[in-house]
Amino acid sequence: MALAFAGCERSPESSVMRSEVLHAYTAATEYRYSNYDSLLVWSIRLDSLTSNGTAEEKAMSAVIKGAWLHSQAKYFQAKQLYKTVLAGLNQSTNDTLKGRIETGLGIVFRQTGQMDSAFLHFYRALRLFERAGNTEGRSGTAVSLAQTYQQTGQYDTARALIRSVLGSGDRIHYTTQLIAMHTLANIYGEMGLIDSALRIDKLGLKICDDLNKPVIASTFYDNKGLCFRELGIYDSSAYYFRKCILIDSAAGNVKQTGDSYLNLASLASARKDFVTAEKYLQRALSLCRSCNYTAGVTSAWSMMSDLYRMNNDPAAALAYKDSLYSDYRRANKRDRQAMILELEAVYNAELKDNQIDLQNEQLERKSYFIAALILLSITVLATAVAVLYRFRIRRQEEKRMLELKAAAAFYEAEQQERLRIARDLHDSLGQILSATKMVLGSVNEQADNKSALHKTTALVDSAISEVRSISYNLLPDALQFGVEKALLNLARKLSGETGIEIACEISNSTQSKIPSDVVSLSIYRIAQEVLSNMLKHSQCSMISIKSGYVDTTFVLEIKDNGRGFDSSEIPVREGGSGWINIRARTALIEGKLAIISHPGAGTSITLSVPLK
């Protein structure tokens, strides 16, 4: 958030405030997806620090307070806060802060069902982040925009946005990557692609477990619960919703806890267990009322009415709906009165604070206070810089790991699509074209149609060849006979094209466990990428490929006699391909990659893949 203060000329007293605000904002950011009670504490602290601060400092405070208000479903208050702060940023050139406030407004409008306004604010935020060159902000807003397209049923656009974030190769925060993965899993679930959704959920939960991020893990558990409910596996669905309740209630996320109780109520209702369903609905209603979660309250009393109707008690259903509706209106009235009183109290407190600040300002002009504050500002700023430096170093390794795992999720979904398309081309379109050619060949070649027949046959031949080429690029034919046969064919093909000797030695052992289609294709693509790198860069005259099995592990070793390199300095990314692709595909199949190379001594790359 150093951008929040770029170019500001401030007094020494203000400099102290700047460092304290930066420290509080950094600390608060860590609690956005871990503990909402702690987030509230830091929000109050930021409010106090920025009460007389600049528009930029107040905007930083609004970002944190808005995050807490979202967790409590207090969208009206969040909207008023964002609009007030945004008006104060009219003269500011800080596009990053403006973008964060616009994103907050987009979330408010999406959560309250005002989708047109949500799209408007999200696209405004994207333009601001692009102008500021803020990759993190642009990626986070793209994920929120994808969620909006998802809620309006535009799944293809939503999926394309998520893939642009996960496959961009940009360095973004782990929370953004995890939320993007969860959104993609949600999209697949709603599209009925349950297997793909559950695979992403599994990977997301493993990453959350590695980083000890239970609140983000709750979103993946929620999606698993929804997927199993869709499959009719109610016991598993209830298990995951209960896990969400444990996590969200501990974190202070009242809104999400209420949603989980609503989900449990729907499961009990589907099982005709009306007593349990009513118990869950009463709990959900209490939670949703406590945080003024309008949509949750509406769902709860509507489900309660439906419950009584299914229980063959229409009179009670109508009476219950009427009483709950009246109670809901009274609660809304009390909330509005409480909010007016709160605004009046804040206004009066600000008047008193302004008077006190005016008196303090006159006293603080004395030189000995100025000297003391300058010394304090230097100390606090140095401490903040040291803390931020350690924080960044600690996060670097976590980000690298997450980039690989997030890319792995993207590649897995992509490879499933490749397998499906390749089989469709080969089994459907290819067969139709072949049959068409046979029919054309059986037609009598009369003098007046002989030329047209030959042209048509030639076109069909060309189409068959093109289908075979596309199908081979997506899924090589040799993979039907095993990955080792495919590697042997690949070695022969590349050796013939380049003139470089490529020896391929495959095992003759018979294994009870063989690589699956996805694993085989990933091994083949990794080998392609490695061989391509060697042929392009190593200046070698010979390459050897060996493959075999050690117990239940498939081992592939590729060596060259080229110029080699320092393997301790392997680049993390090469324009979105190269080593990042090799590592991502290796992570996808839970394999291990060993790279040994020294200048002038060639290169050896060993891939080990456990077979399940």
Image (spheres, helix red, strand yellow):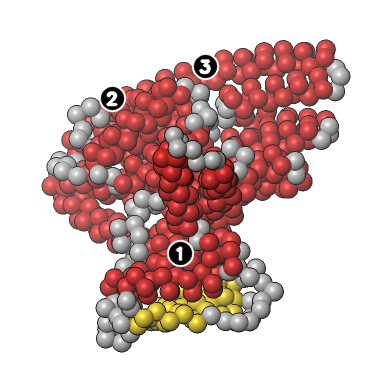
Q: Secondary structure at mark 3?
A: helix
Labels 3 & 2 near each other (Cβ < 8 A)? no
Q: Tell me the residue at 45%/67% (across/down).
A: 526
As shown in the figure, which amino acid type bears the numbered disc 1? Arg
Q: CA distance from mark 3 to mark 2?
A: 26 Å
| Residue 87: image tag | 2
Query: Which residue does the numbered mark 1 point to in the structure image?
Result: 525
Q: CA distance from mark 2 to mark 1?
A: 53 Å
Foreground residue, 51 or 364?
A: 51
Vertical arrangement, residue 123 with respect to residue 480, above or below: above
Q: Tell me the residue at 39%/67% (across/down).
A: 529
Query: Which residue does the numbered mark 3 point to in the structure image?
Result: 337
The answer to whether one can see residue 139 in this image is yes
Local crowd size for mark 1, using a 10 Å CA cut-off: few (<14), some (14–19), many (≥20): some
Q: Secondary structure at mark 1?
A: helix
Q: Tell me the residue at 31%/30% (across/down).
A: 124
The picture places residue 592, in percent across and down from the top left corner, at 50, 73
The picture places residue 315, in percent across and down from the top left corner, at 83, 12
